[in-house]
Image (cartoon, rainbow, N blue to C red):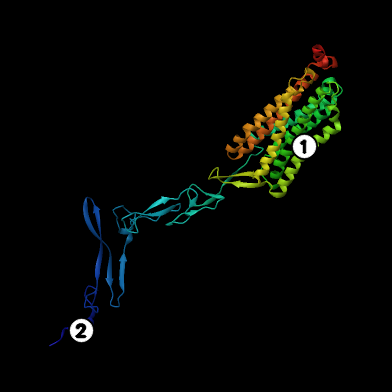
Amino acid sequence: MCLSFQVTDYLQRVNFRNQFGDDVFFDENGDPPASYDIINWQLRNGQVQHVTLGHFASAANGDFRLNIQEEKIVWRTGKRVPTSVCSNVCPVGTRRAQIKGKPTCCFDCIPCADGTIANSTGAADCTPCPQEYWSNERKDECIPKTTEFLTYHESMGIALAVVSLLGASLSLVTMMVFIHYRETPVIKASNSELSCFLLFSLFLCFLCPLTFMGRPTVWTCMLRHTAFGVTFALCISCVLMKTIVVVTAFKATIPGNKVAGKFGPAQQRIIVCSCTMIQIVICVLWLKLKPPFPDMVFRYSNKKIVLECNTGSEAAFYAVLGYIGILAVVCLVLAFLARKLPDNFNEAKFITFSMLIFCAVWITFIPAYISSPGKFTVAVEIFAILSSAFGLLSSIFAPKCYIILVKPEKNTKKHVMGKKMNKK
């Protein structure tokens, strides 16, 4: 009588091939070999047919054989093989987002946010671009941000440059007119030397905006602010001295008053140079301690970098503006007080009007400068420089040029002194 374990032992030793060519054997568990036909259900002519595409069979040594004729397979989707996963692999430019309550293989593909990229498929997270770069449209590559600054070849830059050169040319032409007609009564009455100093300073003021355009560099940033401060300080110092001369000239007509002798040509040059030197000292300290420098500003837009000149020290910048403002206010007050002098000294009226324009321009400049974005900040500053310079040029010199060139019959000592004589 055989025991069960003996039967199992004999069965495990069985190994032969039958008449159909199939191997017959039993494994250690007593199980026969696996042999399966792989059948594809195919719909043909409205009927389902079972088409054998391959065979699977196991061997005695634990191996298996699998044969499939893939070209005969017909899927529900046709010849295209369907995927066997819940979600497809996320393409570049997207990241995986897990679907709550579903297996980990089920996820949504979320496009990367602006400024981040995913340059490989199946990315779990998007990588932020460096500060100077931005993502492209496909969100698979970081590209450099566009840079923005006021250039000479754009329409706004061309217009400002043309106006600037026009103002400089008008200043030179006016200076030549004053030099050519320096012996005439109108020029003599307006102090030809101070007028030429003022015209030269206006010429420099008109050229200042050219330094504000173009790509900011270390040298241009230092030049644009200091040149602006010094030239306008020289300009307003000349206007202030002209106002003082007008007032003292009227005082000299009063018997016993010797104040006019204290403001001769030498004293005038000293006062103008001294007022300008104070601004030069402020600018030198500014450049020495914390000078302006080129800076990249990212706050205006995510896709572009605004190149501008950082003032370095805001206190120094406002000190330069403040000093020019103090000179302008003093000049305005003196000119306003002298506005009712006799007509042959009526230059105070023109100075008063020019200073009103100057102060109005720079008062409105400050809020516009602060609120303007990007390169428009520079454009606003250039506009303020040109507007104030044109205000001074037109208000002080246009009436005199009109008399010299258009009404030469009024350019006589009798006409200049006539109204005063009539009043006497």
Q: Residue furthest bottom?
A: 1
Which of the 4 image quadrants contains residue 98? Answer: bottom left
Q: Nearer the viewer, residue 248 or 235?
A: 248
Q: Residue furthest left?
A: 1
| 315 in relation to 254, above or below | below
Q: Nearer the viewer, residue 194 or 165?
A: 194
Q: Is 214 on the left or on the right of 10, as rendered?
A: right
Q: Is 328 on the left or on the right of 93, as rendered?
A: right
| 91 in relation to 36, above or below | above
Q: Residue at x 67, y 46 (%)?
A: 292
- The disc, 1 or 2, on the residue closer to the chain's N-terminal end is 2
Q: Can the viewer see residue 395?
A: no
Q: Nearer the viewer, residue 323 or 203?
A: 323
Q: Secondary structure at mark 1?
A: helix
| Circle 1 residues within 10 Å: few <14, some 14–19, many ≥20 | many
| 62 in relation to 385, above or below | below
| Circle 2 residues within 10 Å: few <14, some 14–19, many ≥20 | few
Q: Which residue is mark 1?
A: 275
Q: Secondary structure at mark 2?
A: helix
Q: Which residue is mark 2?
A: 10
Q: Position of residue 54 (x, y in %)?
A: 28, 64
| 57 in relation to 46, above or below | below
The type of residue carrying mark 2 is Tyr
Q: Is 290 on the left or on the right of 198, as rendered?
A: left
Q: Position of residue 286 (x, y in %)?
A: 71, 46
Query: Mark 1 and mark 2: span between their CA atoms?
Result: 122 Å
Q: Can the viewer see residue 307?
A: yes
Q: Residue at x 75, y 28 (%)?
A: 170
Q: Position of residue 347 (x, y in %)?
A: 76, 22
Which of the 4 image quadrants contains residue 102? Answer: bottom left
